[in-house]
């Protein structure tokens, strides 16, 4: 049997009417709904793409598991940015055509199906549930995946989704809490699926600045103090969409347990889920360009700070998120759709919390230009 049917409230057409209202407002629409980057792709990435445009990996079929250079770059990045030695813990990696397909195909590539249960946060990225449904498995939503008492004794649990920093809430899990998830999952033979796509986007005041050769980041599920020095039963997802503004390049990866990555790579080869050759070179450049990542980090930090202040002035109770690129607020009216209606009247469009499992909340994205954020701030402060 092929893909199973899925159902989800995650349908951007549902906010089309609010966008029409916002476009008619004085000054036009400021779209803070979709988390799509707006800043330039780093020069290093564009140069690598151009230089490799006639390489053997371009005019010939590209390598599913990544070129030797890309694989080296992935290992270098994990060591420098995540304090993880992939080889030392028995891990491997495979590039994916963006992180969304990696998430959506995960349950299917792990052969989950009827009777299998995948645990996920109740408030979370909708594609976790969609991917589970496509495989024909069952989703178990819990308030806190770090509290294993919610799921460790449930029959059929095969995997646990972790998202830190979290989309949409911005919550960051400590290394201790992540280690607890890994231990509990291993005890029942389940796989930890750690979505760490916003790992380099953290905003804690007490986090020390990284030096010139490293990047400050949140705890990784493959870090030795989290996984106990072994990648067994742990898979981590990462994307260059936000760190390097490469959403359109579709560059992401899965790293972790070698015994799981190998079969995944084999299936990916057969179904053609392969990053184009020149894009693999661009991905390697993006992973190595720490200066560009730090520049983007500074941009997002400034925008988030401005957005948080403006939302407070408008009457929302909120603080700077721990991580990720969104401000998650409780609707003043108690209903995300009513708040969306009111915001649209002043030209601002947010994302309804219902998309993420919390209809009483809204998500505001900082992936907008400086001018757009400033315009939104000015309107919210009126």
Image (tube, rainbow, N blue to C red):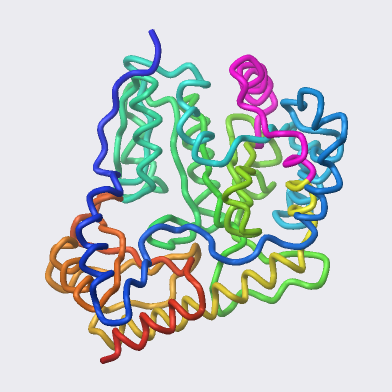
Residue 230 falls within the magenta-colored stretch: no
Front-most of 284 and 318?
Answer: 284
Residue 328 point in image, percent of width and height? 34, 66
Q: In the picture provided, is 148 more to the left or to the right than 198?
A: left
Q: Horizontal and vertical percent for residue 287?
A: 75, 52
Q: Nearer the viewer, residue 319 or 103?
A: 103
Residue 131 located left or right of residue 76: left
Dominant secondary-structure state across the stretch colored magenta: helix
Q: Is residue 82 left or right of residue 175?
A: right
Which segment is the magenta one? 255-281
**Residue 382 position by quadrant:** bottom left
Within the image, what quadrant is residue 66 found in?
top right
Residue beneath the point at 33% across and 63% down: 363
In the displayed structure, 306 sits above or below 133; it is: below
Position of residue 78 relative to residue 185, above or below, is: below
Residue 42 at x, y = what percent?
72, 62
Q: Quadrant of the N terminus?
A: top left
Name the residue rendered at 36%, 49% in the picture: 124
Foreground: 66 or 77? Answer: 66
Q: Is residue 245 left or right of residue 283?
A: left
Q: State the image quarter where residue 347 is shown.
A: bottom left
Residue at point 38% right, 18% down? Answer: 3
Give the answer, above or below, for where 349 lies relative to 185. below
Specify the farthest residue to the top. Answer: 1
Residue 367 higher or lower than 277, as above or below: below
Residue at the extreme bottom: 382
């Amino acid at each position: 049997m092929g893909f199973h049917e899925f159902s989800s409230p995650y349908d951007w057409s549902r906010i089309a009417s609010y966008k029409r209202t916002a476009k008619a407002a004085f000054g036009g629409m400021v779209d803070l709904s979709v988390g799509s980057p707006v800043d330039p792709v780093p020069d290093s990435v564009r140069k690598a793409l151009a230089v490799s445009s006639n390489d053997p990996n371009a005019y010939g079929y590209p390598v599913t598991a990544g070129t030797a250079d890309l694989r080296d770059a992935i290992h270098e990045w994990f060591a420098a940015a995540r304090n993880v030695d992939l080889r030392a813990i028995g891990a491997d990696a495979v590039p994916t055509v963006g992180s969304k397909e990696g998430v959506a195909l995960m349950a299917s590539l792990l052969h989950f199906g009827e009777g299998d249960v995948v645990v996920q946060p109740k408030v979370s990225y909708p594609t976790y549930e969609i991917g589970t449904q496509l495989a024909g498995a069952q989703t178990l939503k819990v308030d806190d995946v770090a509290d294993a008492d919610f799921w460790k004794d449930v029959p059929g649990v095969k995997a646990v989704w972790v998202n830190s920093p979290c989309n949409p809430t911005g919550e960051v899990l400590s290394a201790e809490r992540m280690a607890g998830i890994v231990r509990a999952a291993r005890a029942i033979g389940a796989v930890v699926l750690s979505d760490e796509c916003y790992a380099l986007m953290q905003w804690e005041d007490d986090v020390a600045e990284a030096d010139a050769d490293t990047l400050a980041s949140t705890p990784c599920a493959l870090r030795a103090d989290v996984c106990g020095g072994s990648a067994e039963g742990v898979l981590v997802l990462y994307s260059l969409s936000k760190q390097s503004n490469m959403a359109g390049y579709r560059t992401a990866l899965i790293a972790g347990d070698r015994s799981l990555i190998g079969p995944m790579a084999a299936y990916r080869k057969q179904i053609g889920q392969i990053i184009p050759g020149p894009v693999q070179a661009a991905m390697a450049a993006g992973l190595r360009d720490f200066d560009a990542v730090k520049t983007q980090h500074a941009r997002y930090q400034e925008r988030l700070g401005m957005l948080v202040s403006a939302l407070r002035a408008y009457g929302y109770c909120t603080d700077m998120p721990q991580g990720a690129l969104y401000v998650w607020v409780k609707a003043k009216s108690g209903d995300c759709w009513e708040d969306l209606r009111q915001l649209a009247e002043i030209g601002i469009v947010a994302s309804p919390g219902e998309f993420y499992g919390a209809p009483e909340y809204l998500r505001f994205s900082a992936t907008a230009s400086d001018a757009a954020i400033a315009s939104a701030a000015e309107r919210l402060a009126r």
